[in-house]
Image (cartoon, rainbow, N blue to C red):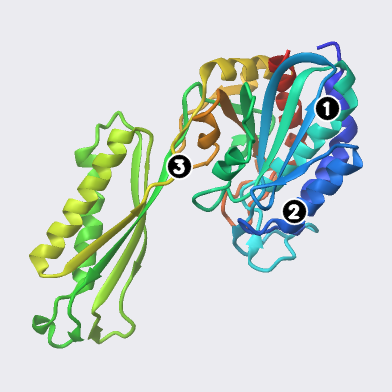
Amino acid sequence: MTLDIRKLVEKHNSSVIELRRYFHTYPELSGQEYNTQKKIMSELQELGLSPRAAANTGVIVEIEGAFPGKTIALRADMDALKLQDEITKPYRSKNHGVCHACGHDGHIAMLVGIAKVLYEIKGQMAGKIRLLFQPSEEEFPGGAQQLIKEGALVGVDAIIAAHLWQTVEAGTIGVSYGRLMASPDEFTITIKGRGGHGSMPHQTIDPILVGAQIVISLNTIISRNIDPMENAVVSLGLFKSGEVFNVIPDTAVLKGTVRSFDQNIRLQIFERIEKIARGIGQAAGAEVILDKVLGFGPVVNHPEIVKEVVQAAKEVISPDKIIEIKPVMGGEDFSCYLEKVPGMMVFVGSGNEQKNITFPHHHPKFDIDESVLSLGMEIMLRTALNLAK
């Protein structure tokens, strides 16, 4: 590009940081991003753009260049988490029990900043850049499917998203040429036994004992039933039963998650969960009910788009700062877009030990190194402009 993209990004950098702090101060939960939507719409309308509401609380806006070319989509997620913000910065959340602890505040701010740059250069650019501000990424079924239903990908040739990532050092980016994030599935196991006095366990069917045996057995699935060369996880996050110390309760509830990349592996894991849970329950005389929720698919990047991002990144940072990373087992409904059009998600490093920015995603003290917002903006801009040509 003959355009000075870096200079344009730097021009808007302070406003992007200010906007990120605004969104961090006023976070909103999935499906409730009304103020966030209003702020985004206002920022875009002030530029002279014509954004439209979509997926209830989302926003779609398109910037068309003066020359023919392709249509490239850029996506940012908008929602925050049910978490009490514990950072000590001036932009600490003012919405009690709600916190941007996953970097979505930065994603929104970067995309608004990109809109500002694109509006300035639209007379010199080819194609169209469509910006997707997506609600409800944190809660299944997510907002991606609804945006797609409302035309987010109509005519789109490729899509890109940047995710601020704490375990990648600030100033570097993490890329994967294939698998990046896993399918996030859920399950609930309800155990119905027969309660009684703790002093007379022989008269009961103890759901706590049954549940404990199920927990131990489920933790053998990955090590004993799944190919060790495959990426997969089974984790229990809830075991709830009983109210007092001397009463064996009637029921127990277990909740957990399954993470995988391969559909056959996914089904195999759930088959084993069901056989193990029902088998242990049957042996003890308890009724076991399994409820499962299959989430969205895995995020699998398209190699040809990754190459474009890497090429653009080399114009911004040195090659040694572009790191090929292993897949992570977190989930993302960005996969819904990738099932429709070629694209990729890039991890923009946001951790910085020198600034004490070390807390992981979904932690109440999570924060980002704001200096990386300009890096994410510039890489996405350069990639989108190159692809649009």
Q: Residues within 10 Å of mark 1 (few under 14, many from 20)?
A: many
Residue shown at the point (64%, 25%) measured from the top left:
156
The image position of residue 201, as x and y in percent, is 13, 82
Would you say 315 lies left or right of 9 here?
Answer: left
Q: Amino acid at mark 2?
A: Thr
Position of the N terminus, as image quadrant, is: top right
Per the image, the residue denoted by label 3 is 296
Per the image, the residue denoted by label 2 is 36
Q: Are marks 1 and 3 in contact (CB under 8 Å)?
A: no
Per the image, the residue denoted by label 1 is 118
Position of the C terminus, as image quadrant, is: top right
Would you say 332 lies left or right of 99 here?
Answer: left
Q: Amino acid at mark 1?
A: Leu
Would you say 193 lies left or right of 152 here?
Answer: left
Q: Amino acid at mark 3?
A: Phe
Q: Could you tell which of marks 2 and 3 lies nearer the N-terminus?
A: 2
Label 2 and label 3: CA atoms lie apart by: 25 Å
Give the answer, above or below, for where 217 lies relative to 198. Answer: above
Would you say 268 lies left or right of 177 here?
Answer: left
**Element under disc 1:** helix
**Element under disc 3:** loop
Residue shown at the point (63%, 64%) measured from the top left:
84
Label 1 and label 3: CA atoms lie apart by: 32 Å
Label 2 and label 1: CA atoms lie apart by: 21 Å
Residue shown at the point (52%, 28%) measured from the top left:
340
**Element under disc 2:** helix
